[in-house]
Structures are given as structure tokens and as C-alpha cells.
Image (cartoon, helix red, strand yellow):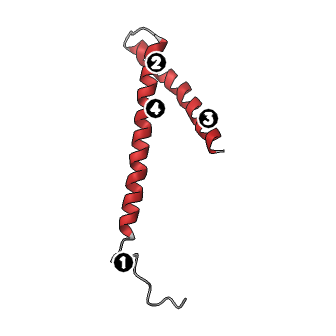
Amino acid sequence: MLAVILLAQTVAAMAAGHHVWVGEQRVHEQPLEIAEFWIWWFWEYNLSIVADTYGVILIVLLSKRLVEEDSAESKDDPNDSS
């Protein structure tokens, strides 16, 4: 199921990216060469993957920091009767 979602997102990103790229090329009066689109799309897609990956790493590391030893979150609750 995850692969289907990733594939659908990739296809949507390609369609939207092509639309944006064509608009930028026309505004700057540049030729519409498909090879240039693929270079641009590859760059944008991978930049997004890197940003998302670093975001996840930061969230995990910051969450880990909150529950490390001697933090208020990691101490047992003295009122807990379990």
C-alpha cells in the first residue's frame, strides 16, 4: 500500500512539476527541451526528499532528547499505583 501511495505522489509531482517548469520556461522565454525538464525535476524531487529526511531525523532526535535519562518525561510518576 505504501508503494502505491509513493507512486501516486510521484506521478502527481511530475505532472505538477511539468506545469510549473513550462510556465517558468515561457516567462523567461527559454526553449521547452524535455531533457532540461528531467534535470530540473530530478533536482527538485531529490531536494524535497533530502529536506523531508532531515526533518524526520530532527523530529526523532529532538523527541529522543525529551525522554532521555534525568528529564522530567522519563521519571516515573510517584503517584502512579501500577
The residue shown at (46%, 18%) is 37
The answer for how far apart the CA atoms under marks 1 and 4 are is 40 Å
Q: Quadrant of the C terminus?
A: bottom right
Q: Amino acid at mark 2?
A: Phe
Q: In the figure, residue 5 lies in which quadrant?
A: top right
- 16 relative position to 25: left or right: right
The answer for how far apart the CA atoms under marks 1 and 3 are is 42 Å
Given the current orientation, which residue lies at the most extreme left position? 70
The residue shown at (40%, 49%) is 55
Q: Which mark is residue 25?
A: none
First in sequence, mark 1 or 4: give its number: 4
Residue beneath label 4, please? 45
Residue beneath label 2, please? 37
The answer for how far apart the CA atoms under marks 3 and 2 are is 20 Å
- Judge whether 44 appears above or below 57 on screen: above
The residue shown at (56%, 25%) is 15
* Residue 32, horizontal then vertical, whole percent: 46, 10
Q: Amino acid at mark 1?
A: Ala
Q: Amino acid at mark 4?
A: Tyr
The reply to whether the C-beta atoms of the residues labelled 3 and 4 are less than 8 Å apart is no
How busy is the neighbourhood of tag 1: few (under 14 within 10 Å), some, or many (20 plus)?
Answer: few
- Judge whether 75 appears above or below 11 on screen: below
48 vs 17, nearest the viewer? 48
Q: Which mark is residue 8?
A: 3
Residue beneath label 1, please? 72
- Judge whether 74 appears above or below 3 on screen: below
